[in-house]
Image (spheres, rainbow, N blue to C red):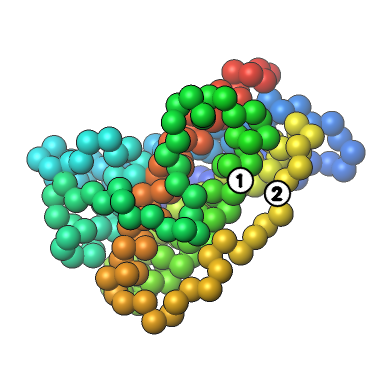
């Protein structure tokens, strides 16, 4: 089962800690972050093959591969309506989690600090939300080790990309936003359906932010070639 190897693979993509006072070229951390983002995208899309029949017969248009692969393994455990073919609920949002969707014009006009700051804030929020979803699913689906492993691996990768983004910002001389408690007060009395909806939004945004990070880093990679 390949998902058990993800933490080992991830370690090879993380940056070593910089030596104090040593100059850092932005090209190196950008390349490292880009490789990790591509790995995340590729790794999360492998599970899509398992569910390709559902996707072909009822897949919703406009949903990324990364979202489908991570979400489908979760949605199959959640029951109807989440596991129904073609299920999609773009109107569901969490106020504590920034959406990845943005117009191309606005996205392309972002400067380096804005681009990296948005990604930094999103993946910080995702690490916290994935922890919450993992806790929810241990309660809702305790007998689903594949689901729990996938959520744990997604959180680990989000943390890794968060660290790489910070390294890029340091290399560019940009301030790193302070870590914040993005979740705030969590209603512990949330119903099972509410927790399932929460998990759906988190896994959807994880996939969409991963796709956006790949494009962000590709643009920075072209801007700061090695």
Quadrant, the C terminus? top right
Q: Secondary structure at mark 2?
A: loop
Question: Could you tell me residue 37's position as x and y percent?
Answer: 50, 37
Question: Taking 117 as reference, is 46 left or right?
Answer: left
Relative depth, front residue between 165 and 16: 165
Which comes before the other along the chain, label 2 or label 1?
1
**Mark 1 sits on what residue?**
120
CB atoms at circles 2 and 1 under 8 Å apart?
A: yes
Relative depth, front residue between 169 and 104: 104
Q: CA distance from mark 2 to mark 1?
A: 8 Å
Q: Secondary structure at mark 1?
A: helix
Name the residue rendered at 48%, 65% in the picture. Answer: 131
Q: Which mark is residue 111?
A: none
Question: Taking 21 as reference, is 137 left or right?
Answer: left
Q: How many marks?
A: 2
One can see residue 146 in this view: no
Q: Residues within 10 Å of mark 2 (few under 14, many from 20)?
A: few
Question: Could you tell me residue 41's position as x and y percent?
Answer: 41, 38
Q: Quick check: 220 above or below 174? A: above
Relative depth, front residue between 192 and 42: 192
Question: Could you tell me residue 176's position as x and y percent?
Answer: 73, 45
**Mark 2 sits on what residue?**
177
Name the residue rendered at 57%, 42% in the picture. Answer: 119
Q: Residues within 10 Å of mark 1 (few under 14, many from 20)?
A: many
Question: Could you tell me residue 129's position as x and y percent?
Answer: 48, 61
Q: Quick check: 81 above or below 63? A: below
């Amino acid at each position: 089962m390949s998902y058990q190897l993800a933490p080992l693979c991830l370690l090879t993509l993380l940056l070593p800690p910089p030596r104090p006072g040593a100059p850092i070229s932005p090209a190196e951390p950008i390349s490292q972050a880009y490789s990790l983002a591509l790995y995340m995208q590729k790794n999360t899309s492998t599970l899509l093959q398992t569910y390709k029949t559902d996707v072909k017969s009822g897949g919703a248009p406009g949903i990324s591969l990364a979202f489908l692969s991570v979400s489908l393994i979760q949605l199959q455990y959640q029951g109807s309506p989440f596991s129904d073919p073609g299920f999609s609920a773009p109107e569901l949002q969490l106020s504590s989690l920034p959406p990845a969707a943005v117009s191309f014009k606005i996205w392309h006009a972002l400067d380096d600090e804005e681009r990296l700051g948005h990604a930094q804030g999103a993946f910080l929020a995702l690490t916290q939300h994935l922890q919450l979803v993992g806790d929810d699913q241990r309660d809702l689906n305790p007998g689903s080790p594949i689901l729990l492993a996938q959520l744990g691996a997604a959180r680990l990768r989000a943390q890794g990309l968060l660290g790489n983004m910070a390294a890029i910002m340091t290399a560019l001389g940009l301030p790193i936003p302070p870590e914040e408690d993005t979740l705030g007060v969590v209603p512990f009395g949330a119903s099972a359906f509410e927790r399932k909806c929460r998990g759906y939004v988190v896994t959807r945004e994880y996939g969409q932010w991963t796709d956006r990070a790949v494009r962000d880093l590709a643009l920075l990679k072209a801007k700061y070639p090695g």
